[in-house]
Image (cartoon, rainbow, N blue to C red):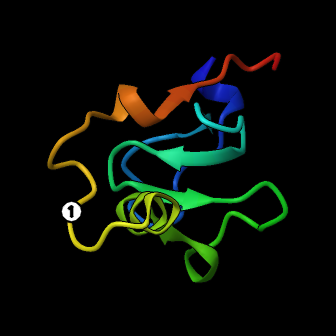
Amino acid sequence: MQASLPQCPRCEQDWVHPYRFKDDGAAFSLCTECDSLWWPHEALEVATARFLDDVVAARLGVGGNPWESRLWADVIEPLSEGR
């Protein structure tokens, strides 16, 4: 499976996996090593990477750490390759 996934261009330490937000199903790509996030229309490049914490905080309308009272599993979930 990992051979078909792209390597993270930011950290080069892990693969970029498909994920989605649980609330609305919005898909994105995520490196779980460095928490870099890309939207589907973006090229997987360092210049277009966002940080998961920043995106989650903006979506939830919270400042600072969005994980103080929640876990990743509360907000996001991995997608299988076929979805």
Identify which residue, 22 or 6, lies in the foreground: 22
Quadrant in the rendering for residue 83: top right
Residue placed furthest toward the left: 68
Amino acid marked by disc 1: Asn
- Residue at point 49% right, 34% down? 76
List the residue tagged with mark 1: 65
- Residue at point 28% right, 73% down? 63
- Residue at point 38% right, 54% down? 35
Identify which residue, 43 or 58, lies in the foreground: 58
Residue placed furthest toward the front: 61
Residue placed furthest toward the bottom: 47
Give x and y (percent) for residue 38.
63, 60
Is residue 70 found left or right of 7 in the rendered image? left
Quadrant in the rendering for residue 43: bottom right
Label 1 Cα crowd, 10 Å radius (few <14 / some 14-19 / many 20+): few
Number of numbered callouts drawn: 1
Is residue 68 found left or right of 47 in the rendered image? left
Identify which residue, 40 or 65, lies in the foreground: 65
- Residue at point 63% right, 77% down? 48
Looking at the rendered image, the quarter that the N terminus falls into is top right
Give x and y (percent) for residue 3.
64, 27
| 43 in relation to 48, above or below | above
| 73 in relation to 55, above or below | above
Is residue 73 found left or right of 28 in the rendered image? left
| Mark 1 element type | loop
| 62 in relation to 4, above or below | below
Give x and y (percent) for residue 32.
39, 42
Give x and y (percent) for residue 24.
69, 38
| 55 in relation to 66, above or below | below
